[in-house]
Image (tube, grey):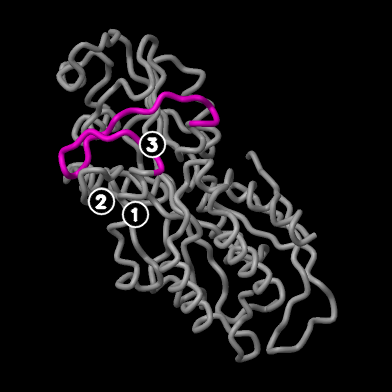
Amino acid sequence: MTTFRMSIIAGAMLVAGVAQAADVTTISGAGATFPYPIYSKWAEAYNKATGVKLNYQSIGSGGGVKQFTAKTVDFGASDDALKPDKLEELNATQFPAVMGAIVPVVNITGVAANQLKLDPATLVDIYMGKITKWNDPKIAALNPGVTLPEKLITVVRRSDGSGTTANYTNYLAKVSPEWKEKVGEGKAVNWPVGLGGKGNEGVASYVKQIDGSIGYVEYAYAKQNKLATVQMKNSAGQFVTVSAASTAAAAASADWKGAKDFYLFLTDAPGAASWPIAAQTNILVYKEPENCAQTEAVLKFFDWSWKNGAKMAEELEYVPLPKELVALIEESLKENVKCEGVAAALK
């Protein structure tokens, strides 16, 4: 298991308006690998700005939820938003931290980044194991003029409980009744075919190494590993290239006000410019935390990051939360997170 750790520093906290006896010096979290690159960047900047430490374990959404429910970390992180009834059971709340894109990535000799076009049906057939070679007529029909090798396709997917997988399979289930019925969606599914990689890091590594492979990762991992992304046909019938702009176009369609506990998927969004597999990553905190100072330090970190880290997010091709959504989140947190009966301090 690959574990990544980051550092941040938090200043003096106020609980119920009373200064804590000791400053919070470290906050801890665990979960999604999807946002690790931006959390790492925010952590470094926050450390310099406030003087403190964030210890974040990038172990996958499933592992993050487990550590959160075991109360071994101050916050959990999951790309797979928890359903409202599960949050109620845990006496917890969640909020999105940042948005990004999940992208199919390929390693095909002679095929450049964004040269290959795929539509939903073809992508599903590849992951169902029905299309097994790159020169299959269905792929060739979408790619006139592209030389496709008669090479077996190596399908790469996640081996761990993954929010990236939850969003990816949510998309496949939306566009394919067969996938929905036979495979379904979630952090872990019974994959028809494929080689399993641990985390976004593991999938990226396998795709980078194996000629003829296809996998799915958060866009920042594709860029960092110089992996070839593909064009995807979206719900409007347009082939689009992944970018911060096409991800933002998908995110713009989200009805956050109508989403109870911010439970929402951004996949298969409407709009000619929308990337079809966009996602938000979420943070979990308890409504009545055992250690209020630690939870308040978590909320202050994310509040600082939203207000100071937009450019950092954009540099890594994430989509910062719009101000309107940040306002909704802060309103929700003030209503839901209580320290000794008083709304937790966010700033």
| Horizontal arrangement in the rendering, residue 154 relative to residue 286 (left or right) | left
Residue with the mark numbered 3? 103
**Mark 1 or 3: the one toward you:** 1
Residue farthest to the bottom?
341
Measure the C-alpha gap from mark 1 to mark 3: 15 Å
Number of numbered tags placed on the structure image = 3
Please say whether residue 173 is one of the residues in the magenta stretch.
Answer: no
Q: Position of residue 322 (x, y in %)?
A: 43, 61
Secondary structure at numbered mark 1: helix
Please say whether residue 234 is one of the residues in the magenta stretch.
Answer: yes
Bounds of the magenta segment = 223-244
| Horizontal arrangement in the rendering, residue 187 relative to residue 184 (left or right) | right
Residue with the mark numbered 1? 251
Residue 92 position (above or below residue 126): below
Residue contact between numbered discs 1 and 3, judged by CB atoms under 8 Å:
no
Residue contact between numbered discs 1 and 2, judged by CB atoms under 8 Å:
yes
* Amino acid marked by disc 1: Ala
